Image (tube, rainbow, N blue to C red):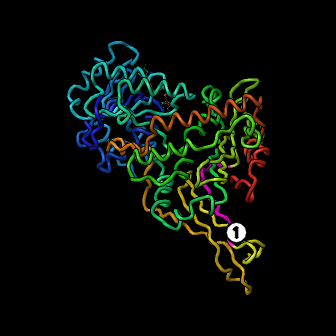
Amino acid sequence: KANVMTNSDVGAFVLFGGSGDLAKRKLYPSLYLNFIKGLLPDDCKIFSVSRLSEQTQAFQADIFLQLERYVSPSQFSDEKAKAFVKCIRHVQLDITQVDAWTTLETHLENFRQSPIIYYLSVAPRFFGDIAKGLSSVSLNQNGARLVVEKPFGHDFESARTLNRELRLFFDEQQIFRIDHYLGKESIQNILALRFSNNIFESQWHAGAIESVQITVAETLGVGDRGDYYDNNGASKDMLQNHMMQLLSIVAMEPPFAFSPDAIRDEKVKLLRSLRLITPEVYADHCVRGQYVAGSGERGYLDDIGRDSSDCETYIALKAYIDNRRWAGTPFYLRTGKRLAGSLGEIIINFKPSNPELIRSKSGQCSNNQLVINFQPDQDIFLFINKKDNQSEMFLVDAARLQLSTKSGDLKLPYERLLAHVFEGDQTLFVRDDEIEVAWQWLDQLVVSWSAEGSRPHPYDCFSQGPEQANQLVTNGSGWERIK
Ligand code: NAP
């Protein structure tokens, strides 16, 4: 084991699962974008590892076609893509075979004096064996970095076991656990907005904020991921990872420094203070749903080809954070498939100011809202009240201030995350204790709905989700409509 060197002097990038879907759609395009921006080290070699029997030249030609397909036309250049694919070598290897690691060692012999990045874009059951295999030929040394994809476990115990397996051979400073939401521009912007603007940070507490809503909605169904999805549901697929990450960034205390561990320490502290949803309070705090046929679409059970399933394709929560800053402020979280729209949104609802003194045409003036959209668009809006210039009386109306400015192509999440791995910066990656505490919280939620014997409520395709979820929102004007 060895400490990570925090420089970009990376010798090689090894992509386990280099012939897979994630690699083709996201990873090569993101590596290419870093390449054209000069962010990859000179002479960087990319080794694609899989069982595919293909010569490097044919493989490079295939990756060129994938780049043409998945890189935006404004960033694709024939010439640069040709130069980029020349960096790629295909290594045919079955990682379950005993001789796999000595074969890989031979390929990496000339690169092992510099840090090597290993990206594990393979099924999680291989993670432990890969870490062990690399260590067996000392390829975990000299600042090597290990990047692992989600899902990271399916509960607290499995995540802890996986962490232990990886840490037998790699230090925590060498492990980069991906949550691609952390690579989104708007999510980074939450930190910038909160900690560089006194007008926000001074108001970022229960005294000024009435509630927070976090929504990740999709119009898509489960598609061909039925088997995976039915064992996990919205709670494990979205809530435990992406939604908990968003929540921790929105609500954490200011870190003492802008360093990876100072930030992650605060995120862990926040997750630890998230109140458990026990069986006694479950019914008032959580609603699960499952989409049924409607609007010309098949229901979930048809999609997965089963007669019955208790798996939730929708989950909504009212969560509380037991610390001084957030005492009493509800955090409403919801995520689901086959909903009325596809969006990712965080809404900070501020408390009303002088509701009886100043009115709008329709009565009470609106509360201030900060709206952070992180998908499909990355926008930030602030709604504030101003005098209604069409009225003679002293009435106000709400103005929408756009806080985000777009200039050129925004970095894609994987593009940014890969750049950070090359730099050896762990800020945007999930630490072992973060993952474990998020699973502990979710495990309790699963126990609670099991104890209650509750089944997911049906909801129509392309609706707002099950009606029962409306009862969770006990203040303000309910859930923001999904459009
Ligand atoms: P995939 O398309 O099934 O690709 C799996 C890759 O692993 C292939 O390149 C496969 O190549 C390789 N592989 C399998 N067994 C191997 C073995 N014994 N030796 C060497 N290589 C082997 O899966 P994916 O969708 O790319 O997903 C990869 C990982 O990322 C999974 O953990 C997944 O959960 C996660 N993930 C995927 C997405 C996504 O959008 N796809 C999003 C988030 C997370 P061969 O079969 O040719 O050996």
Q: Residues within 10 Å of mark 1 (few under 14, many from 20)?
A: many
Q: Is residue 352 magenta?
A: yes
Q: Principal SS element in the magenta part? A: strand
33 w.r.t. 223: above or below: below
x, y percent for residue 308? 76, 25
The reply, left or right, for residue 362 in relation to residue 77 is right
Quarter of image, res 358: bottom right
Q: Residue placed farthest to the bottom in the image?
A: 392
x, y percent for residue 126? 44, 22
x, y percent for residue 385? 65, 73
129 w.r.t. 46: above or below: above
Q: At 45% across and 29% down in the image, what residue appears?
A: 20
Q: At 53% across and 25% down in the image, what residue appears?
A: 158
Q: Which residues are magenta?
A: 341-353
Residue 100 visible within the image: yes
Q: At 75% across and 45% down in the image, what residue appears?
A: 469
Q: Ligand 1: does it lie within 8 Å of the C-beta at label 1?
A: no
The reply, left or right, for residue 179 in relation to residue 147 is right
Residue 295 visible within the image: no
**Which of these two is toward me, 187 or 324?**
324
Q: Residue placed farthest to the top in the image?
A: 98
x, y percent for residue 65? 41, 38
The reply, left or right, for residue 108 in relation to residue 270 is left
Q: Check disc 1 and give the amino acid type.
A: Ser
Q: Quadrant of the C terminus?
A: bottom right
User: Which residue has dot 1 on it?
Assistant: 366
Q: Quadrant of the N terminus?
A: top left
Q: Is residue 333 magenta?
A: no
**Which of these two is toward me, 191 or 104?**
191
Give the structural element (helix, strand or loop) at label 1: loop
Count numbered badges in the picture. 1
Q: At 53% across and 56% down in the image, what residue appears?
A: 378
